[in-house]
Image: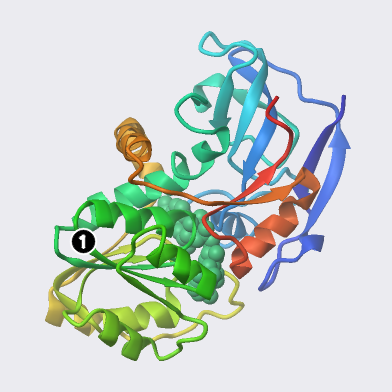
């Protein structure tokens, strides 16, 4: 039995490339007290991984060259030295880009395949769903009737954020980078309107048309010129959650945008960055809400699936380029 692992081979400058990763084969890890051995079934590839490939200061240490890439996954317990888990259980946690992982049992969460498919625990019932829930509810305090704009709207976080805002009675406008994504948002997901920022590049005109009464809440996943245009249309007492800034992650030189702090004075607006990790003590609350809406059919989700651990770098790079609709996943092994 070998353990295939994808390790960081080089720190990228600008856009990462497949050669920044390398696959190696090792023996499966051995367990210590309180630890659990899992077989990885699903791997989540996420924008934050770009930050962990870099040694720029961040909220977490960079992945070291030669170390297994960090990543959340869903796995099946093979062996357990932890009293909460038995072989055959399904769990989620930071399993890394590899076939087998040994993790402290205390850092794993049980997943219930009866409530939702295993892969959903990396999307709507995983980090992205929880990010959408806490970022929107806790940071933005949306009220029924308000206009909410979501950038990166057809991605894992954005697609859930917009639907929660709809559930709360808001008018929701999405911004995404493909016509098929816009059709999904305004069709199946029930967004009130959306526009394709790649083909409709006059963002000010698009926002003026779609948000005639201004913008009360902005959930920002992308930053850059899209965010600059949204800021020009915010209402008094607007709330802005800085969830992500993906348009900046691969820049080699920081970009100086317009200085919009004066706007915040005039509009008495609140801008707040947040990290979902700070909400760990409230994950149960978030999962109950998200799970309830999912079961009631009020939350819908899509997954983009790439097959095989060896293709994880391709899946990750594709996600950064916008090839995913909804959650980008890698299927590492069959579920049964
Ligand atoms: P995602 O949205 O599923 O995938 C990334 C998407 O970003 C792509 O599909 C692409 O869609 C869009 N994108 C890429 N480059 C862009 C650009 N230059 N301008 C505009 N859009 C661009 O990823 P996710 O996991 O849901 O994450 C979304 C954001 O939330 C990221 O910024 C991430 O860092 C952040 N995040 C933050 C937290 C937190 O705790 N604060 C937690 C999770 C995620 P298009 O086709 O629309 O371009």
Q: Position of residue 176 (x, y in %)?
A: 46, 72
Relative placement, left or right, of 285 versus 45 is: left
Residue found at x 62% / y 65%: 323
Image point (65%, 38%), residue name: 42
Q: Is mark 1 on a helix, strand or loop?
A: loop
Q: In which quarter of the image is residue 333?
A: top right
Quadrant for the C terminus in the image: top right
Q: Position of residue 159 (x, y in %)?
A: 42, 57
Figure check: 91 above or below 193: above
Left or right for 15, reference 9: left
In the displayed structure, would residue 61 be above or below residue 183? above
Q: Would residue 176 appear left or right of 260 to someone viewing this image?
A: right
Q: Residue furthest front?
A: 187
- Mark 1 — residue? 170
* Snapshot colouring: rainbow
**Between 139 and 117, which is closer to the camera in this rendering?**
117
Between 105 and 299, which is closer to the camera in this rendering? 299
Taking depth in this image into account, of 79 and 26 the one nearest to the observer is: 79
Q: In which quarter of the image is the N terminus?
A: top right
In the displayed structure image, the side of residue 29 where residue 185 appears, left or right: left
- Compared with residue 28, is residue 66 higher up or lower down, i.e. above or below? below
Q: Is residue 260 visible?
A: no
Picture quadrant of residue 249? bottom right
Total marks shown come to 1
Q: Residue 256: image x %, image y %? A: 44, 85
Residue count near mark 1 (Cα–Cα under 10 Å), binned few <14, some 14–19, many ≥20: many
Residue 188 visible here: yes
Expressed as whole percent of the image width and height from the top left, the position of residue 304 reads 61, 53
Q: Residue at x 80, y 48 (%)?
A: 310
């Amino acid at each position: 039995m070998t353990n295939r692992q994808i390790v960081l081979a080089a720190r990228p400058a600008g856009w990462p490339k497949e050669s920044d990763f390398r696959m190696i084969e090792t023996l499966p890890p051995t367990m210590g007290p309180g630890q659990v051995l899992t077989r990885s079934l699903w791997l989540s590839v996420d924008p934050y991984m770009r930050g962990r490939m870099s040694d720029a200061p961040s909220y977490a240490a960079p992945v070291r060259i030669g170390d297994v890439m960090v990543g959340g996954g869903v796995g099946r317990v093979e062996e357990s030295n932890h009293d909460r888990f038995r072989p055959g259980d399904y769990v989620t946690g930071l399993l890394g880009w590899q076939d087998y992982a040994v993790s402290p049992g205390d850092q794993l969460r049980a997943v219930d395949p009866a409530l939702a498919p295993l892969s959903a625990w990396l999307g709507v019932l995983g980090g992205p769903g929880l990010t959408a829930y806490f970022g929107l509810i806790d940071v933005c305090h949306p009220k029924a009737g308000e206009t909410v704009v979501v950038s990166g709207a057809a991605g894992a976080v954005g697609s859930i954020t917009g639907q929660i805002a709809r559930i709360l009675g808001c008018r929701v406008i999405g911004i995404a980078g493909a016509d098929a994504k816009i059709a999904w948002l305004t069709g199946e997901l029930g967004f009130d309107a959306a526009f394709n920022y790649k083909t409709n590049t006059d963002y000010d005109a698009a926002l003026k048309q779609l948000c005639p009464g201004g913008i009360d809440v902005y959930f920002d996943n992308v930053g850059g010129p899209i965010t600059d245009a949204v800021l020009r249309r915010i209402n008094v007492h607007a709330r802005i959650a800085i969830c992500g800034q993906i348009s900046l992650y691969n820049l080699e030189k920081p970009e100086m945008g317009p200085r919009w702090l004066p706007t915040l004075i005039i509009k008495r607006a609140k801008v707040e960055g947040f990290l979902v990790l700070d909400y760990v003590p409230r994950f149960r609350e978030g999962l109950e809400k998200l799970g309830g809406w999912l079961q009631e059919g009020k939350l819908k989700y899509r997954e983009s699936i790439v097959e095989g651990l060896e293709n994880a770098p391709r899946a990750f790079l594709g996600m950064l380029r916008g090839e995913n609709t909804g959650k980008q996943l890698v299927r590492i092994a069959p579920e049964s």
